[in-house]
Amino acid sequence: MRYRLPRGPTKPESEPDHPMSLLLRPWPFPVLLALRYLRSTRRDAFASFLSLVAAGGLTLGVMALILSLAVISGFQEALRGEILGRTPQIEVELPAGLGDAETLAVRRAVETVEGVTSVQVQVRGGGWVMEKGKVQAVELVGFEGNVPRSFPGAAGRPEGFYVPAPLAARWGLTPGRLLQVVSPRPTLSPFGPQPRIRSLKLDGTYRSGKTQEDRDRVALPRDVAETLLGNHDRRLDVEAADLDAAIDVAERLPAVLPPASVVRTWKDLNRPLLFALRLEKAMMFVAVSLIILVAALALVADLSLIISSKRAEIGILGTLGATPGTLKRAFLLLGGLVAGAGMLVGTVLGVGGAWVLDTYKLVRVPGRVYFLDYVPFLVQPLDLVLVLGLTLTLALASALYAARRAAALDPVEAMQR
Amino acid sequence: MSVAVRAAGLSKAYRDGLRRVEVLREIDLAVEPGEMVAIVGPSGSGKSTLLHLLGALDRPDAGSVVIGGTSLAGMSGAELAAFRNRTIGFVFQFHQLLPDFTALENVMLPGRIAGREPGAVHAHARDLLAEVGLAERFDHFPSQLSGGERQRVALCRALSLEPPLLLADEPTGNLDPASGSHVFELLLDLQARHRTTGILVTHNPEIARRCSRVLELVDGGLRQAPGER
């Protein structure tokens, strides 16, 4: 860019303005000095190399951190979808011995709570399903009305008997087939205590998901379930508009519930899993951040070398009236420019790379081994803010350390070097 | 514009290992506005140290420096830097130009440090360089200039903000006699035309004699040079 200014009386007509005269730009002096030193550093092979190492290290660190957090977030999101899709939003464990009328009254009271979209009385317990000599331990979930949301693929269907799709496939079950459901709760007979058995016609299947659940669940009408399990373990399956709303709703429920009721949200029900996911992400963040720490140290070395090689010039600037603050800001900015270049490239490569890898599903994994057949990448804004915040903090701390050394130089001593 | 320079009881000592070397002992100095004073003395006599104290580049162990009625005592580093920028122009033996900046940019530096408007600083720097015959050297870097040219650029840089005080430390000491003489003529001419108070440190008796007054620094004390009025 060429700047044309009013010419002085003694300016020869033939003399062109300097095409690169940075000092003509109306920027503060520290900015001009930092930009000039950034450019002149290219002439010093070792300083250039160190600048490249520092900027490259920050690029690598930012990119690695963004990609590693994106892959964890991608897996977490997929896993959360899998797990939370099978978990009630809010589960209320009612006190034992609550009669039908009292249970109905509680249910109606819960329905009036702000934010509640549906309430279902359920009963749960362990048991088995049997068919032609084959036995499978299951968790029996007795429900009323339509099939609840926690049975994906069957949710919303009419009351009936539903088993997991893999079990149906393994046993060759089709709707209409008769199965025996067995409860460990004994019933007294002339031959002594006997397990309770009911024959139920299969109404359908639900998707059990690709993760390993503790135990296969089967859904059956609540009245049938209570003949098998009794009514001591009644629960309410409460739904809200979404997962976040469910947390708020859960806080309002105790006011309408009988004493000794226990309210658990989807967070409580999956606490160990959610904690493990957070821990995994945090540990990965710390481990990959070490790359950025090393790059920040390279930045200190780079700036220290530049300051050392410009020592006499810093002294001269001091004699010309550059204040320690001016020099500090210039070298802080120089460090910021090197770090900023690294961060910018790292962010573009990290975010762009994550988008490409996720959109085109470039990293394939065996679907039979994992619950997905590709590695998902999800860049979350908060992760990005954390990565850039950490990088900026470390880079500026490094640059500040070096800049303070430049500002502390005595002009006379610096010039005598 | 010019200022009076007053120094009273100025002392400075350095540590050389365990030894304490007293460089300046209770020096009193008075330079009148517009005067050009030469300070001579053998190598190591403390001429440069005295110049650094007068130029607010170093602090005395004892005594005071007052320039244009402003005492340097008690000023912070930033205040001293700002004072140097607007009040004092320096010319050193080794030009001390910044190698990453062109001749024109070197002359513009004090103005840009002071935060002055770039266009005006640029125009004034061009005028100054043209005044010392360097109109064809605006865009040359110091490495592309001869010794005499570099020192002329340094002189322009020292005078670019029209400081009331010019301090020169052996400004011709690194030049051949012809270039040295040329630079000194320029210095005297510019000092007279810009009506600047000047203090010059030199080994060269010829140059010293052409100043309005010559002082000699011997054994840490300042006295009238022999043969001077």
Image: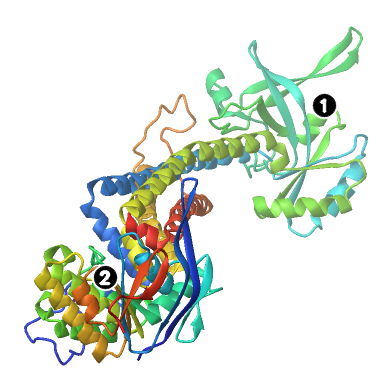
Please state if B207 lies on the left or on the right of A144 as rendered: left
State the image coordinates of residue B62 (x, y, percent, origin top left): 54, 68
- Seen at 87% across and 31% down, the residue is A232
Question: Amino acid under label 2?
Answer: Thr
Q: Chain of mark 1?
A: A
Q: Can you tell which mark lies on residue A229? A: 1
Q: Which mark is residue B202?
A: 2
The N terminus of chain B: image quadrant: bottom left
Judged from the image, the secondary structure of the residue bearing numbered disc 1 is helix
Residue sitting at x 17%, y 76%: B183
Q: Give the side of residue A296 with respect to residue A217, left or right.
A: left
Please give the chain letter of the residue carrying mark 2: B
- Residue B30 drawn above or below residue A33: below
Decide: is A260 above or below B205: above
Q: Is residue A317 at all visible to an observer of this figure?
A: yes
Q: Position of residue B37 (x, y in %)?
A: 32, 80
